[in-house]
Amino acid sequence: MSLRKFISNKTIAALAVILTVFASTSAFAQAAGAAAETVAKPIDMGPVYKTVIFYTMAFLLLCLFIAIIGKSLKVYELTREAQDKPKGINWNTINGVLFALFLIVGLYGVYWEYTVHGKMILPEAASEHGKKIDQMFNITLIITTIVFIATHIILFVFAYIYRSTGKRKAYYYPHNNALERIWTIVPALVLTVLVLMGFLTWRSIFYKIEDPNNKPLNIEITSSQFAWAIRYPGADGIVGVKNYKLINSINALGIDFKDKNTLDDQTADEMVIPVNKPVRLILTSKDVLHSFYMPHFRIQLNTVPGMTSYFEFTPTITTEEMKVKTNDPKFAYLFLCAKICGEGHYKMQKEVRVVSQAEYEAWVKKQGTYLTDDLRKEFNLPVAAAPAAVAPADSVKKDTAAVKTNQLALKK
Amino acid sequence: MSTISLHDTHNHDSHDDHGHHKETFLTKYVFSQDHKMIAKQFLITGIIMAVIAMGLSILFRLQLAWPEKSFPILETFLGTWAEGGRIKPDFYLALVTIHGTIMVFFVLTAGLSGTFSNLLIPLQIGARDMASPFLNMLSYWFFFGACVIMMSSFFIQTGPASAGWTIYPPLSALPTAIKGSALGMTLWLISMIMFVASSLMGGINYVSTVLNMRTKGMDLWKMPLTIWAFFLTAILGVLSFPVLVAGVVLLIFDRSFGTSFYLSDIVMGTQVLPNEGGSPILWQHLFWFLGHPEVYIVIMPALGISSEVISVNSRKPIFGYHAMIYSLIGITVLSFIVWGHHMFVTGMNPLLGGVFMITTLIIAVPSAVKTFNYLATLWRGNIRFTPAMLFAIGLVSFFISGGLTGIFLGNASLDINLHDTYFVVAHFHLVMGSAAIFGMLAGVYHWYPKMFGRMMSSKLGYLHFWLTFISAYLVFFPLHFLGLDGVPRRYYAFTEFEFMQKWLTVNVFVTWAAIIGALAQVAFLWNFFYSIFKGKKAPQNPWEANTLEWTTPVEHLHGNWPGEIPTVYRWPYDYSKPGSDVDFIPQTVPFSQTMTSNMPHDFEGNTEAERIQREWEAKNPAVAEK
């Protein structure tokens, strides 16, 4: 050890001592003030814990501690060397053992995570297709967990067993074609099964055959910064045409009331849907990208300005049933925004209620229409409540045709 | 000599009397054209950027853990962005955006590829320098410029870009949508163009150097896996980065010149924008056409480095050398046709979703092969736990853990519910974040003696590894479960939603783990910078490795080897070969000097060599028997 190094070490040590003293005095100075007021009470360290300097000092102290350990290890090793004894500390063994320990503790940690945090995740899917997704999730989870555990056991056990002892020579084993073929083909086969399942599920979600006797309920969702607007189709079951160019302070969605289908379109503060009846979501965005995410139903689709997208699903569990299942009387379904959309991204939510058909019908009757008196004036419609037939007949045909084409191009 | 002669003669003059060649401070340390110096420049810039990006992550982790608490110190440093000691929502988004951008591009692309491709390509293939040292220098300075411009956005009033690192328009195109899309986004875009220019210059250089400047005997199938990985990474970058530039230029047009490539039918508040006919989805296609290969640009060099490190420190040849290369090639090719798996739920045609799901899950096969080959390399090895080896093993662990969750996300049906949740965050932070950074750290510990001629302290290295390894798992493992509960990423606070409240305590835990992980990096930083000046002097071949870089002198020379460039005779993985006295045989040792350990396979069908070997064995039956 050179003299210069020795001095610099001493300087560092001296500096550290000064810092420690400074840290404790500054901490005690504050503490003393508090203590002076109430001698009997234990010293209130609260304010000290809030200061940055406290943590900086604590960290420096920790560094000093580590440095001392490091130095003493070095001294120990040097003395062993000077006495011609074998190396004091075998770091290969230490690290090998640490890997083995990490494996044991890690396996327990994984078990703990699966059982504790694993219980805090979403409840069972509340939609028909969601059940398929969950089933596939579980299959994938089982396969990946087995691989995860097995490979980690192999990795860390090998690290432990084959740590260098200085006595053994490694086994020259550059390749084994049979082995390599096995571990190419087996993952390929497993993945083929997963791909096929995923592909079939994906198709069944997005390629729906419309049942004429069980037509889906159309609900239009419009996202904007940072709110959702829900539009129900009204009695005619058709969500009328809208045009972003018509958006103004009274017509927030830009609904084109020249289209007769719009006249009965209803507003809603929450999404209420009847159980076991198909629902077709019509997703649009007014400004930037958002993502319509309804986790309990395993639904997510981005809302894109200039493009309408659709998601059809059938809810299977009512809110009331879910309250029982989750044992949570406050349980509520909801949808939220999952695509970064601006500073209010974290607040975009709406409640969803799945109810019986009768409840739904009672609820939907109470919802107001989008068409207000102000809008009637703007679109030159009679202000008194008028039947839908008043709307100009010529535009109707075209618009309903437009709505009909509003379906997936690749529908099978 | 198979290298370019012009270059050679130029350097020959200066080897013997190194120093006569006039090198000023400026040409040696700043505008250096020496690949080793450029590598160090990339590395140190990368480390600085990594520390900054890590600091940003701690800031937003503080917000996530204690959304209601005030930290007055934040106001001291961040001013109005953290009024009252609480980070504002738009600044929170800026933090995650810049954290992602820096980590992905500046640290794991430039910091990783830039450092190790520059350092190792000439040294491991036996070249005096890069094909174009000048372009190489420009590459660094464009990168440096990109870093400076990116960081400068912290000093403007509207703040840095904040539309996420993927900067999806319209959010990134409209300053009215978010503050960060004003000047901050312009700077982001300029910075990114410079960055791409830098990585293209680098990439072209790497490819041409590997193809043209290998030393005598160094055919492609004798190259170390590191070189294969850097080579394929460079090809990926050269082919995919220009697409990002195309996308970025169109976005600049949309932002500044009123075009409508990505914009259509937009109303901000009640103001109807005139843009018509564009599609925000177009950006996503262009972005992810780079973005997905980018993931492999990040991970492949790390895999290459760990292949080398694991082989050297297991004292065993890498298992399945050819399979390793073919899987790298497979990953390279496939990575161009999987970008759509980032877009399953954009509303693009579901048919495409199905196709991209198939290609995505196919790419898992070569990744699995690589993993199993690593495990087979460890089997019956003689493992020396150098810090580099620890990090390489850590990489394998992260690659498995994060790779497996990719099977969930690559499945379009499962992605519906997992897309843009914390599950994704956990997935890519393990498989490309932690794994790639561990590969980079393994590389730093392993080639530090080559870079600085000194050794790092291995004990501090152990401390660094164990703290980082454990805290990385503690940070990212629980996040999977947030995702499975449907918690979306990039949420400023979990306080607005009833169902997220239960995760607040987990967030506190994760933040503490992240803080410990961040502080552990102090051990590395200290070790790194202290050892540059005060570390123990390195021997020429500290790890007893076979590759060419360890045949160069410890003191750097411009031109790498003082005399002729050594000739290569064998592959780089002859460790613990039976019949050999030492457990490593460098690539430069001809077979004629290792008659006792030669195997029939070594001669690759060279009948003359086989005949000589047979004759020798006939003469020395005792040794040959062994």
Image (cartoon, rainbow, N blue to C red):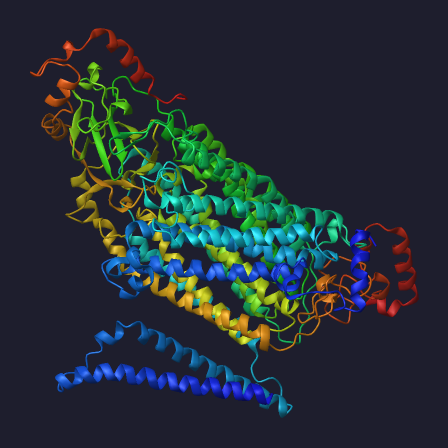
Q: How many numbered tags mark residues here?
A: 0
Left or right of B380 in this view: A126: left
Where in the figure is residue A149, as x and y percent of width and height? 46, 57
Where in the figure is residue A84, as x and y percent of width and height? 65, 90
In which quadrant of the rendered image does the C terminus of chain A lie? top left
Q: Is residue B70 visible?
A: yes
Left or right of A198 in this view: B500: left
In which quadrant of the rendered image does the N terminus of chain A lie? bottom right
Extreme-bottom residue of the structure: A83
Q: Is residue B456 visible?
A: no
Where in the figure is residue B372, as x and y percent of width and height? 58, 54
> Does B83 appear above or below A329?
below
Which of these two is toward me, B72 or A283? B72
At x 19%, y 8%, the residue is A392
Extreme-left residue of the structure: A384
Extreme-top residue of the structure: A394
Location of residue A124 (image quadrant): top left
Left or right of B170 in this view: B13: right
Where in the figure is residue B205, as x and y percent of width and height? 67, 48
> Does A31 appear above or below B128?
below
Location of residue B615 (image quadrant): bottom right
Which of these two is toward me, B449 or A145? B449
